[in-house]
Amino acid sequence: MMRKLRVAAISAAALLALTACGSGSPTEGGTTTAPAEGSEPAAAGELTAIEVGVIPIVDVAPIYLGVEEGIFEEHGLDVTLTLAQGGAAIVPAVQSGQMDFGFSNVTSLIIGRDAGLPLKIVATGPQTTGDGDDDFAHIVVPEDSEATSLADLEGKRIAVNTLNNINDSVISEGMRQEGGDPESIEYVEMPFPEMVAQLEAGNVDAIGAVEPFVTLAEASGGQRVYGQYAEPVPDLSIAAYFTTDEKIEQDPELVEAFTAAMKESQQFATDNPDMAKAVLPSYTSLEQDVIDELTMPRFPQEHDIASLEKIAELSLDSGLIDAIPATEDLIVQ
């Protein structure tokens, strides 16, 4: 069944590793896999078909691994994983009922909830490693840059994948904590796959990159100066899986089954890091030498509520939202 996942991912191979806050249309994606060795799959006809919108990035390795290992089948779910460029395509698909669940960064979900979108987090996604020197997201400067810290980038041009979202929010908070002026930063919006070339060309002073682009930038001589996920917010939760309030109310058993399967998949990826990396070629176009070098996120089972609250505070301070959503309106606990 691994072959089916790879075939389904071919249509999205050119997307590489984009983020949960990008744009674009969904593309047809993966399918279910055989159950894990020794497990008892649900009888034929008992599986409930669901569609989940995901993005071809390292963050979603656990759900692909969970499908391959039969974890979702054990919970009665027949999963189709549909690849999209970002949450801007996934959110409306989930809202309309085209998809049952989706993946997006937490800032986008907080902004959406504040705007009245009936979306709620049902399962956690990736979390920073908490190690400012070894995380899957870093600010990288050119080899000849004099900057050795985030504070040295005061007044400089920093590339982020999307303006007014999670990356510029945490970078600004980091600059504030380092004693610099976050208002002095000129953020430049560009897709992650373009960042390394733009940094080399001197069009920006630094890039706020995630894997695999951190590794690719370093291979070109780039230097890490700050872990924007690991340093400003302890145990930062970056993204999550979500659905609509209507789905939660009308089919709570389905939501519970998906949440339980995601928790098990996150734990399986944590316990089997080599397998989490090994699944990446099934839905991305990453080369093996890059996969070997990149840093993976942590994959917790539970969302860090304090982290969510801090991101909401940063979103409020930045003017991205008018009020901090109540925790019970944002996440199913």
Image (cartoon, rainbow, N blue to C red):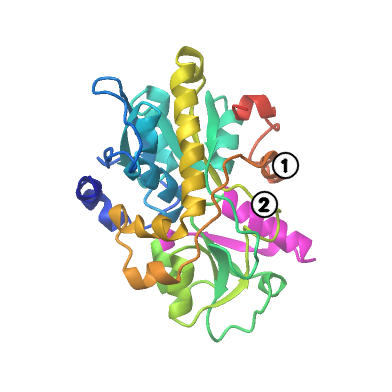
For the magenta stretch, what is the residue range? 165-192
**In contact (CB < 8 Å): disc 1 and disc 2:** yes
Nearer to us in this view, 327 or 113: 327
The residue at the point 51 percent across, 46 percent down is 267
x then y, percent, for residue 178: 77, 66
Q: Look at label 2 and name its amino acid.
A: Asp
Which residue is rendered at x = 38% and y = 31% of the image?
A: 74
- Residue named by callout 1: 306
Extreme residue toward the front, this view: 38
Q: Is residue 294 magenta?
A: no
Q: How many marks?
A: 2
Tell me the quarter of the picture where residue 254 sits: top left
Q: Residue at x 55, y 28 (%)?
A: 120
Where does the image place residue 296, in percent across and percent down from the top left?
Answer: 50, 60
* Residue 3 x %, y %: 20, 50
Q: Where 14 falls versus 299 (above or below)? A: below
Which is more N-terminal, label 2 or label 1?
Answer: 2
Q: Nearer the viewer, residue 52 or 170?
A: 52
- Which residue corresponds to mark 2? 235
Report the quarter where the C terminus lies: top right
Identify the amino acid type marked 1: Ala
